[in-house]
Image: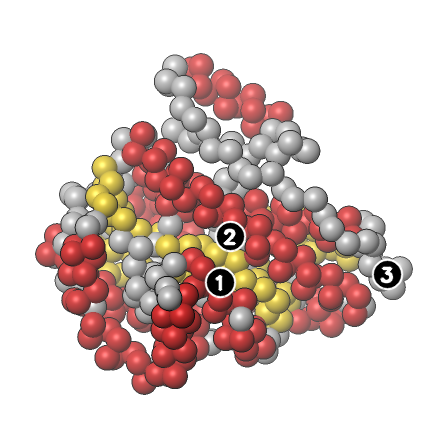
């Protein structure tokens, strides 16, 4: 049963959704549960940006649902861009992979049939091998270290490098720390993973991670995942708490383990064809709005992370929290993944991220 509500003091709850929620609640007479409160949208800062008198339509599509922190970020983006372009840029939001999953949406940007999307970096590693650094297990010890990397020199360089092949990369947000869920039983050590069929993102390092841990991984688009879990095509998957809840995976996955094994960013992308049509002032506006969206979305994601973990427990999910020793068992077992990928990804890049982590913990 979904109880997440999007509520904003300015917009209020959508009347239809509120009615439906009320109706479902009465019909099933569920006990009252604390609904997830999204932090309010910040005020739009900055004045109107001068355009060229033309109107633009910007479709922005993501894979996650309307109750994700990511969608909330998109709502803020829309508000900023529409207000500051004085309505000359009309932003239309699409969620739940309505216009395609991460890879399809990126292709649509390249073809010029979609203007913006914000995929996880992981499915894009064939196109941008340097993104693989975000797939290394346990590399980012805290969200603050991730921020330093994404918002610093490394992140800036990666945005420049990803501005090619029909794409313009303008900002970072977060999917967050990934947690394991499954339908077979509680997992507290790599031994418990033996033969477990785990869906991974379409990414070679993730496949390597789960294979090395002894599971039986299979890559799959996020858009097919709920059905695959429901029908038992796979036994488990891994995603952040907020994604587990907003995608209702807990309805078909009774067990979870707080592994925090990988931190996944979202990268904000614009179609180059659309970009080139925009006057410079509007290009700059999109960059500023993407930055503000990224800051706000990360705040929402982090504020809700623990709260949503608790809600999942309250809704009956059996969540295993690992002791430091238990985490270490996973880390030790995954050492060969580093040996395998270090040179391919670039030892310098990995070392500079480790240095950020070390200086942050001083
Ligand atoms: C949503 C995906 C998703 C990712 C995955 O489009 O595929 O598991 O974590 O959030 O980007």
Marking on residue 298: 2
Question: Between 166 and 305, which is closer to the camera in this rendering?
Answer: 305
In primary-sequence order, the first of circles 1 and 2 is 1
Disc marking residue 103: none
Q: Disc 3 or disc 2, which is closer to the eye? A: 2
Q: Residue at x 31, y 51 (%)?
A: 179
Tag 3 residue: 50
**Closer to the camera: disc 1 or disc 2?**
1
Closer to the camera in the image, 287 or 198: 287
Where is residue 328? Give x, y as percent.
18, 61
> Which quadrant of the figure has residue 3?
top left
Q: Nearer the viewer, residue 350 or 240?
A: 350
Residue 263: where, in percent of width, then height? 38, 60
* Cα–Cα gap, marks 3 and 2: 29 Å
Determine the secondary structure under disc 3. Answer: loop
Residue 191 visible somewhere in the drawing: yes
Q: Residues within 10 Å of mark 1 (few under 14, many from 20)?
A: some
Closest to the observer, 349 or 290: 349
For marks 1 and 3, the one nearer the N-term is 3
Side of 148 where 136 appears, left or right: left
What's the residue at 41%, 65% (across, down)? Answer: 360
Q: Which mark is residue 147?
A: 1
- Judged from the image, the secondary structure of the residue bearing numbered disc 1 is helix
Find residue 316 and report its horizontal and vertical position in percent. 27, 31
Q: Residue at x 44, y 63 (%)?
A: 146
Mark 3 or mark 2, earlier in chain: 3
Are there few (<14), some (14-19), or many (20+) residues within 10 Å of tag 3? Answer: some
**Decide: marks 1, 2 in contact (CB < 8 A)?**
yes
> Which image quadrant: the C terminus?
bottom left
């Amino acid at each position: 049963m979904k109880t997440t509500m999007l509520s904003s003091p300015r917009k209020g709850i959508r009347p239809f959704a509120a009615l439906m929620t009320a109706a479902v609640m009465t019909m099933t007479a569920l006990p009252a549960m604390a609904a997830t409160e999204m932090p309010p949208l910040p005020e739009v800062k900055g004045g109107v940006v001068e355009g060229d008198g033309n109107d633009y339509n910007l479709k922005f599509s993501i894979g996650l649902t309307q109750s994700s922190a990511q969608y909330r970020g998109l709502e803020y983006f829309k508000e900023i861009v529409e207000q500051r372009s004085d309505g000359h840029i009309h932003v239309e939001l699409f969620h739940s992979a309505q216009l395609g999953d991460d890879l399809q949406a990126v292709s649509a940007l390249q073809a010029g049939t979609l203007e913006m999307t914000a995929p996880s970096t992981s499915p894009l590693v064939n196109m941008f091998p340097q993104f693989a650094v975000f797939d290394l297990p346990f590399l980012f010890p805290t969200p603050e270290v991730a921020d330093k990397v994404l918002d610093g020199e490394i992140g800036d360089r990666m945005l420049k490098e990803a501005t090619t092949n029909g794409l313009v990369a303008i900002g970072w947000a977060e999917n967050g720390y990934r947690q394991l869920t499954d339908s077979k039983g509680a997992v507290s050590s790599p031994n418990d993973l033996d033969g477990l069929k785990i869906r991974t993102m379409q990414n070679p390092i993730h496949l390597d991670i789960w294979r090395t841990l002894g599971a039986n991984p299979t890559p799959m688009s996020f858009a097919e995942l709920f059905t695959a879990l429901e029908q038992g095509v796979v036994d488990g998957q891994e995603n952040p708490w907020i994604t587990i809840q907003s995608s209702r995976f807990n309805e078909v996955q009774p067990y979870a383990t707080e592994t925090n094994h990988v931190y996944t960013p979202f990268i904000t992308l614009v179609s180059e064809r659309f970009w080139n049509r925009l006057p410079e002032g509007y290009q700059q506006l999109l960059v500023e709005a993407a930055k503000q969206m990224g800051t706000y979305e990360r705040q929402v994601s982090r504020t809700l992370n623990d709260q949503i973990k608790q809600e999942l427990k309250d809704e009956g999910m059996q969540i295993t929290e690992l002791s430091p020793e238990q985490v270490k068992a996973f880390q030790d077992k995954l050492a060969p993944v580093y040996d395998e990928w270090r040179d391919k990804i670039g030892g310098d890049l990995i070392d500079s991220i480790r240095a950020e982590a070390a200086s942050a913990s001083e």
